[in-house]
Image (spheres, rainbow, N blue to C red):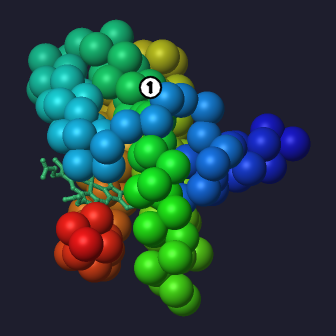
């Protein structure tokens, strides 16, 4: 049940209109994700799991892009749209799981999940950062 609801909310977060948070510019959303991840990694390094949990939550709840940018993504991604959505959903799920480990006070698990989250960010960048950047430029 819960994961189904996640899917519905999250699949919409970057590419369609169903995300829970305010609209923003994709590039500034990403810049903010970068700051949120620095908060997470500082927390990991300092053993401050409260800070890890806060940063992870901010990553999970990132705002969605403006209608105009979502429209460009929808129009421009073609066959890649589903993969792009899944990459976004994966980051969301991994941020939620990291937050759970942090709340539980499990430092080992938090560290593992932190690595998994970074990998999920980079996986999307490797595949979609350049093409989506091009779409935003037109
Ligand atoms: C679904 C795909 C996707 C995921 C997942 C993703 N990114 Fe990005 N990211 C992008 C795209 C596309 C750009 C280029 C945006 C642009 O230049 O308009 C970008 C750019 C960035 C930038 C550069 C922003 C700038 O000022 O040029 C940072 C920093 C960043 N992402 C951080 C992150 C972090 C941290 C995560 C994981 C928590 C993450 N991203 C997850 C797609 C993604």
Residue at horizontal 52%, vertical 76%?
75
Q: Quadrant of the N terminus?
A: top right
The residue lying toward the viewer, choosing from 123 and 73, is: 73
* Left or right placement of residue 38 versus residue 49 in this view: left
Q: Residue at x 63, y 48 (%)?
A: 17
Q: Quadrant of residue 131?
A: bottom left
Whether residue 79 can be seen here: yes
When the figure is inspected, residue 66 is found, relative to residue 135, above or below; the finding is above
Q: Is residue 28 above or below residue 116?
A: above
- Residue under pointer 1: 57
Relative image position of residue 39 (x, y in whole percent): 20, 24
**In the image, the residue with mark 1 has its CB under 8 Å from the nearest atom of ligand 1:** no
Residue 19, picture quadrant: top right
Image quadrant, ligand 1: bottom left
Outermost residue toward the bottom in this view: 79
Q: Quadrant of the C terminus?
A: bottom left
Q: In the image, residue 2 lies at what x, y percent?
A: 79, 38
Q: Is 58 positioned to the left or the right of 28 in the image? A: right
Residue 35 in the image: x percent, y percent?
18, 31
Q: Is residue 90 visible?
A: no
Closer to us: 58 or 114: 58
What is the total number of numbered labels drawn onto the structure image? 1
> Vertical placement of 106 versus 11: above or below?
above
**Farthest right residue in view:** 1
Question: Could you say where residue 99 lies in the image, as x and y percent from the top left?
Answer: 46, 27
Residue 73 vertical placement versus 79 (above, below): above
Question: At numbered mark 1, what does the secondary structure look like: helix, strand or loop?
Answer: helix
Task: Compare residues 121 and 134 and report the one nearer the observer.
Answer: 134
Disc 1 packing (10 Å; few <14; some 14–19; many ≥20): many
Q: Residue at x 49, y 29 (%)?
A: 22
């Amino acid at each position: 049940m819960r994961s189904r609801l996640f899917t519905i909310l999250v699949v919409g977060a970057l590419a369609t209109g169903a995300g829970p948070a305010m609209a923003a510019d994709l590039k500034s959303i990403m810049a903010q994700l970068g700051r949120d991840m620095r908060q997470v990694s500082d927390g990991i390094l300092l053993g401050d799991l409260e800070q890890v949990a806060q940063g992870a939550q901010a990553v999970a709840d990132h705002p969605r892009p403006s209608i105009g940018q979502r429209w460009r993504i929808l129009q421009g991604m073609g066959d890649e749209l589903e993969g792009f959505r899944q990459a976004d959903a994966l980051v969301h799920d991994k941020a939620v799981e990291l937050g759970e480990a942090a709340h539980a006070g499990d430092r080992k698990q938090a560290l593992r999940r932190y690595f998994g989250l970074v990998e999920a960010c980079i996986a999307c960048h490797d595949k979609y950062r350049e093409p989506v950047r091009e779409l935003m430029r037109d």
